[in-house]
Each structure stands twice: as C-alpha cells, then as structure tokens.
Image: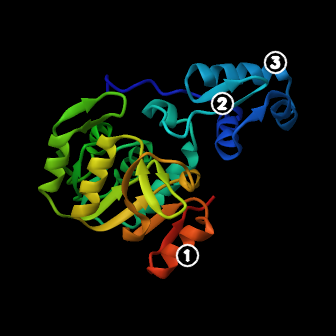
C-alpha cells in the first residue's frame, strides 16, 4: 500500500540488540562488542542507526529500550521479535477453521496473523486493520468488512467512535487480537485510548477470544486497560507465561499454545 510506512530492514545482529535491550534494559556498548565479537565502533554504528529510527534510545556509554509508557511506531515494531510473531501467527491460524467469522485487530502481530490466514477459505473478517485488507484480499472466498472512522497512517488502521461502533454491530466466532502489555495481575493494556476501545469492542462481541502476544509483553507497563487475561479463550505466545499469569490461566482452564522455536 502506498500509505504504508517504510519497513526498517535490520541486520540479524541489530535485531538481536533490540531483543536484548527489551529483555534486559540498559546495555553497555563494550559488553555488546564482546558479546558479538566485533569492535565497539561496529556496535556504535548499529546502535546509532537503531536510535535514529526510534527503535532504541541512546544513553551515556550504552543503549536501552524506549519508554515503557509509549509504543514504537508500526514500522519500527516490525523489527522487534519479527520471527517470533510469525511463528505465533502461524499457530493462531491453525486454530481458526475455514468459513469462520472473525474480528481482526491491528498491530504488527495481527498483520502477521493476517498473512498466516491468507490461505484459509471462506473467511468473513470484520476489521479496522487497513494493511490486513491488502494481505487477505486474494484469499479464496474471503469477505472483508472494514470499519470506517479516522485513519491512522502510522498504525495502518481506522480508529475512533465510528470504528468502535462498527465492530459493535457484529458478533463473530473469533476475536483475534494482541495487546501492548500484560500486567503481573493479568490486566491487559494498550498504549492509546483508541486501540483499547476497539480491542474492548472485539472482546465484547466475539464468541472466542484468541490473544496472540510475544513473551516480552508480560510484566510490561501499560497505560489504558483493555480487560483481563482471565477473560480470553486461548493464549498464543512463544514462551511459557510468568508463574502468576500461568496460575490465573490454569485456574480458569484457559489453554496456552506455545509457538515452536
């Protein structure tokens, strides 16, 4: 799509730096140089590029993640845990049968899910995910209902009261969504009011809710409440959830599906 923001093409080492920063926080330049067995100058070049793109933030002597109170842009988030999201998406697609009706939220994980669903037949998709339309439009028997509303070019979606009201008009077999963060008590968060509103509309109108998140979303600080993990039907992720979350899921009989590494 012409309106889509350009994707940052990162080297495997740069992707690993992003993932390490997400898991550990601040990373000294010298430590990264030793870890990758390259010069400090090479690491600085990697870090400078990632910081220019807004994926990481430069600090004295090292680099760290962006603020946990803000989410990176759609294009920048594609750099982060891209392979994991693709594996999670493939697993979600295995649990959606042909000829099902579904809500599809927006975001980089949901864009990966859209790609994984492209070989399904006869799906009816209600979505505010603009980029997913191009991904799904060639699928056999696909019907797509796109919510109207204010267009966010950064997030490749429609938002606002119109989009939320459109979703509220339907009931679907499945609600497919991701979230920005899962708190230690199981609260689901997004980083903006618009994202949270459409996510809540999906969870309120779907017969089954499939939550797809990579493991770095656990115990992350969020901003706007979406709901609680105890209200989902199934969790799709790439690593076992923390003990507190696993206990909630276990007590409520909610299955956890782990994408193969």
N-term-proximal mark, 2 vs 3 = 2
Residue 3 position, x and y percent, is: 31, 24
Residue that carries the numbered disc 3 in the rendered image: 41
Direction from residue 194 to residue 59 in the image, left or right: right
- Residue name at image x 58 percent, y 44 percent: 81
Q: CA distance from mark 1 to mark 2?
A: 38 Å
Residue that carries the numbered disc 2 in the rendered image: 11
Direction from residue 58 to residue 90 in the image, left or right: left
Q: Is residue 246 above or below residue 50?
A: below
Residue 109 position, x and y percent, is: 44, 47
Q: CA distance from mark 2 to mark 3?
A: 16 Å
Please tell me whether mark 2 sits on a helix, a strand or a loop: loop
Please tell me whether mark 3 sits on a helix, a strand or a loop: helix
Residue that carries the numbered disc 1 in the rendered image: 247
Dividing the image into 4 quarters, which one contains the N terminus?
Answer: top left
- Residue name at image x 47 percent, y 37 percent: 71
- Residue name at image x 58 percent, y 65 percent: 241
N-term-proximal mark, 1 vs 3 = 3
């Amino acid at each position: 799509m012409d309106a889509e923001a350009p994707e940052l093409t990162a080297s495997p080492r740069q992707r690993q730096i992003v993932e390490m920063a997400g898991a550990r926080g601040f990373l000294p330049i010298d430590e990264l140089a030793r870890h990758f067995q390259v010069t400090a100058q090479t690491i600085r070049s990697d870090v400078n590029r990632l910081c220019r793109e807004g994926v990481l933030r430069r600090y004295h002597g090292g680099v760290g993640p962006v603020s946990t109170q803000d989410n990176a842009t759609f294009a920048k988030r594609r750099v982060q845990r891209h392979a994991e999201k693709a594996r999670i998406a493939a697993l979600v697609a295995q649990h959606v049968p042909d000829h099902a009706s579904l809500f599809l939220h927006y975001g980089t994980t949901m864009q990966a899910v859209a790609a994984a669903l492209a070989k399904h037949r006869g799906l009816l998709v209600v979505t505010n995910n603009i980029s997913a339309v191009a991904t799904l439009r060639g699928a056999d028997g696909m019907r797509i209902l796109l919510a109207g509303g204010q267009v966010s070019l950064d997030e490749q979606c429609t938002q606002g009261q119109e989009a939320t009201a459109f979703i509220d008009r339907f009931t679907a077999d499945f609600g497919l969504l991701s979230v920005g963060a899962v708190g230690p008590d199981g609260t689901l968060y997004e980083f903006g009011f618009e994202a949270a509103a459409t996510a809540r509309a999906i969870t309120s109108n779907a017969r089954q809710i499939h939550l797809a998140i990579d493991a770095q979303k656990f115990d992350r600080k969020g901003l706007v409440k979406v709901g609680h993990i105890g209200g989902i039907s199934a969790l799709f992720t790439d690593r076992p959830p923390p003990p507190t979350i696993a206990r909630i899921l276990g007590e409520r009989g909610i299955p956890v599906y782990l994408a193969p590494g």
